[in-house]
Image (cartoon, rainbow, N blue to C red):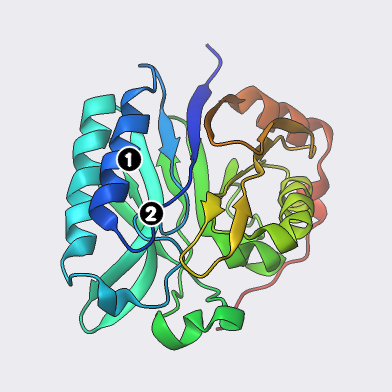
Amino acid sequence: MEQELKIALIQSDLIWENPEKNRIAFSKKIDTIPSGIDLIVLPEMFTTGFTMHPENLEANEGEKTLEWMRRKASEKQAVITGSIPFQEKGSVTNRLFFVAPDGEISFYDKRHTFTLAGEDLVYKAGKERLIVHYKGFKICPLVCYDLRFPVWARNTEEYDVLLYVANWPKPRINAWDALLKARAIENMAYCIGVNRMGTDGLGHQYTGHSAVYDALGYQVRFSDEETVIYATLYKDHIVGTRNKLKFLEDRDRFNLIS
């Protein structure tokens, strides 16, 4: 039987620095998703928008959202993933949580903090990548600005799916489109990008362009509207493409030292 991964990408406006209202809004959207979906993806900082002021949030907001993600994952029997500002041990990270239906939690801290907005001055950068094994697929989740750095995304673990959650603004959306496609081609993997919509509290505009690309770089899903995007990923597509075109075998060999 062919292995499949059914995904739902929620491309939505966000309410500025208001976790409770965002949780309520996303609960309503998640509740409309039909049964049988394996993975539900929310944007970067889906409870706040891309804020550089996590001090405006209660210290336990991260734990509140994590508990909410556990509950929704259990209700839908699907993974819920997305990033939030997360306070821990005196520092704050832009942390992506990957929450399974059974309550198991994995997380990834954004490696490349966005210096143009001063994210590096507020959020502690992560140092380790995450590879999650789920329903026969190996998934590598990353966050927004990570998309610009191909070395960090290099497919050295034979992952099947590269996943980006983002707040990627309208003036640079052409780069988002081009880089998602490039990451799919060079890593011979599905590449998924989930962006937000609307206008944030600083006046920055977002036009979505959430998309799914296959291992050859063909766009199989795309939207520039506020919606839920559905797609099915096929393991046979990954295996067949790599067996026929053995490009990954010729990749440069190296280790990151910092």
On the image, the x and y values in percent for residue 29 come to: 37, 31
- Amino acid beneath label 2: Ile
Could one spot residue 103 in this view of the protein? no
Q: How many other residues sit within 10 Å of disc 1, few (<14), some (14-19) or many (≥20)?
A: some
Secondary structure under tag 2 reads loop
Secondary structure under tag 1 reads helix
Residue found 71% across the figure and 50% down from its top: 180
On the image, the x and y values in percent for residue 257 come to: 57, 82
Please give left or right for residue 12 compared with residue 153 in the image: left
Please determine whether, in this image, residue 89 is positioned above or below residue 102: below
On the image, the x and y values in percent for residue 53 come to: 36, 78
Residue found 41% across the figure and 59% down from its top: 45
Please give left or right for residue 131 compared with residue 27 in the image: right
Q: Which residue is mark 2?
A: 15
Could one spot residue 233 in this view of the protein? yes
- Number of callouts: 2
